[in-house]
Image (cartoon, helix red, strand yellow):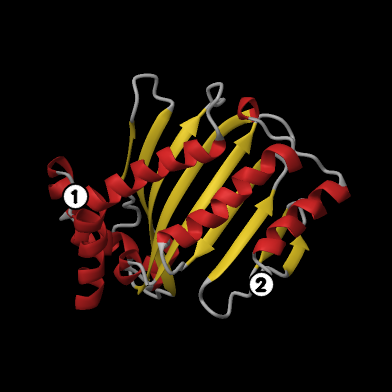
Amino acid sequence: MHPYSSLCDDFYINLNLNTAMDLATNRETILNFFERVQKEYPSMRNFYSRDRGDFVLEEDKDQGQYRWLSLESRRICSGHVNPEDVEQALEQHRLVLQLVPYMLSVSGLDCEAMDLLFGFDFTYRGNHNQLVAEALGVPPALERLAEIDQDRIICYEPALTWAMDPQCRLQCRVSVETRTSAYHIRVNDFPEEQLSVYVTARQYGSLDPGVSFEATLEQLLKVCQRVLDRYVVEGILQPLRKTIALK
C-alpha cells in the first residue's frame, strides 16, 4: 500500500470537474461514456441512477478498495478508495479527462472549476472535536477558551485556504471535518464514525487556450503532494493517528 494509506483507516483520491453548462442527458451518450470506462475497468459493473437523476458506475465495495464514477447535471466525479498507490488512482482520472471532451462535449471553456482531493478517514468512537483539539492544538488566542470545558467542545474543524497564484484562480485548502454532534455529547453516546482530513487543490474558471484537462490535473497533483509531504503528513495526519492510538 502507498505510505498515505498507513496513516489512516481509509484513503482516497477524488477528481471533480464542474461545468458551466448542463451535461448531455441523452441516454446513448451517457451509456457510451460509462461503457468506455468499463472497458478499461471491467470490474466497474454496478450501474444505477440516484433519485435526483445522477448516474453512478462503481466496483463492489466489500473488498475495501474500489473505483467509482458519477455524472451529475453539471459535474463529473471520479474516485478511487484505498488505491494501491497514487498513480493507480491518477490513471483512472486521466482516462475520464481524456474522454469527456469528445464523449460529453466538455471543453476547457466550459470548465467552471476542477479539483483534486486527497481524503483521509480515521475511525474513532468519541468526541471528534475534543480529539482534534488534543491532537492538533488550538491557536494561542483560543487556548484559554478551549480550557473552559474541553470535553464539551461541539465544533472544532480547523481549515485554511490560500491562493497559489496572483489571480487566486489556483487555490489549495486543508480542512478537518468532524462528525460529533451536540446530541452525542449531551447523551454521552458516541457512535463509531469517521473523522476526515481533506487536502484539495482547485483550479477556478475556464482553462487557458491550449491547456488540457490532463495538464491541469498534473498541476493540481503537484500542489496536493507538496502540501501533503511538507506539512500535512507530519503536522496533521501523524498527530491524529498517534492520539487515536493512545485513546
94 or 130, nearer to the observer? 94
Q: Residue at 34% x, 57% y: name it.
A: 154
Horizontal side of residue 115 vs 68, given as left or right: left
Mark 2 crowdedness (10 Å alpha carbons): few <14, some 14-19, many ≥20: few
Under circle 1, the secondary element is: loop
State whether residue 159 appears in this view. Answer: yes
35 or 59, nearer to the observer? 35
* Distance Cα–Cα, label 2 vs label 1: 45 Å
Mark 1 crowdedness (10 Å alpha carbons): few <14, some 14-19, many ≥20: some
Horizontal side of residue 44 vs 136, given as left or right: right
Under circle 2, the secondary element is: loop
State whether residue 50 appears in this view. Answer: no
Q: Which residue bears the numbered disc 2?
A: 43
Quadrant in the picture for residue 135:
bottom left
Residue type at mark 1?
Val
Horizontal side of residue 230 vs 165, given as left or right: left
Q: Residue at 75% x, 51% y: name it.
A: 33
Q: How many marks?
A: 2
Q: Nearer the viewer, mark 2 or mark 1?
A: 2
Residue 189: which disc? Answer: none
Quadrant in the picture for residue 87:
bottom left
Residue type at mark 2?
Ser
Relative to 99, residue 247 above or below? below
Q: Which residue bears the numbered disc 1?
A: 138
